[in-house]
Amino acid sequence: RKDASTAEWDGRIGMARVANPRGKIWNTTGVIRSSSLLCNVEETIYLVEQGCLILTLQGRTMDLHEVLELLGVEKNGCSMDAYNVYSHFKALGYVVSRHNVDWTAKEEPESIDRERDDHSSSSLKLVFDVYAPNSQFRKTSPGVPLFSLCVSRTAPTKNQVNTLERGSKVPVKFATVQGGHVGIFSFTTVELPCLS
């Protein structure tokens, strides 16, 4: 597409460095680090799939297959399941960011590992913060997320749920991906009457 933005993949930090952001998508996508617009791997893949971004590596345009292979690199910090959850919410119009990562900062990351919770590992962690669709969204003052998301291949235990919910200031939802379908669920504590 002639109106697509361009970016160069920086394997050192595991992010794409956007050269010429075009369109409103950038109001809710990417993070600002020392005046540079950077995209995490899930944002990069989503934008390439949508035809909004042309990604290069050492000056050569990467095809979609090569871009998808970035998910297999652990230091990039995103599993295929996490990507499927990210793209599901983006397609619905939500604003999605990595959990507890600032939208803007003066310092450029030496490595993405310092800025993120590793959601490619097997332990349950909050992966994404999800904000309501909002045309007035600003990276400089994003507000409070609607909820945070944990991505898991299996249902979490009661202790895992309690631990994640205690550590979060916003509601927690859980996402699973099976057969390419994303399922979202949450837990509510209820008291059942005594039947004695």
Image (cartoon, helix red, strand yellow):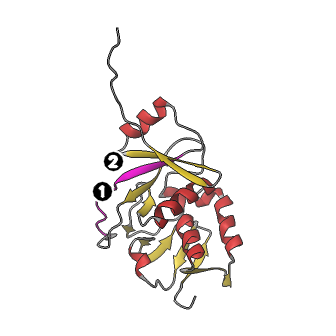
Question: Residue at 39% across / 39% down in the picture?
Answer: 165
Q: Which residue corresponds to mark 2? A: 170
Residue 90 vertical position relative to residue 122 in the rendered view, above or below: below
The residue type indicated by label 1 comes to Val
Residue extending furthest bottom? 2
Residue 21 vertical position relative to residue 116 in the rendered view, above or below: below
Quarter holding the N terminus is: bottom right
Question: Residue at 34% across / 56% down in the picture?
Answer: 145
Residue 144 image point, x, y percent:
30, 56
Q: Do the residues labelled 1 and 2 touch (CB within 8 Å)?
A: yes
Q: In which quarter of the image is residue 73?
A: bottom right
The residue stretch that appears in magenta:
140-151
Taking the image as shown, residue 148 lies to the left or right of residue 63, namely left
Mark carried by residue 85? none
Q: Which residue corresponds to mark 1? A: 144
Question: Residue at 35% across / 31% down in the picture?
Answer: 189
The residue type indicated by label 2 comes to Val
Does residue 61 belong to the magenta stretch? no
Residue extending furthest front? 195
Residue 173 image point, x, y percent:
43, 46
Question: Residue at 57% across / 66% down in the picture?
Answer: 41
Secondary structure at numbered mark 1: loop
Quarter holding the C terminus is: top left
Can the viewer see residue 186 in this picture?
yes
Crowding at mark 1 (Cα within 10 Å: few <14, some 14-19, many 20+): few
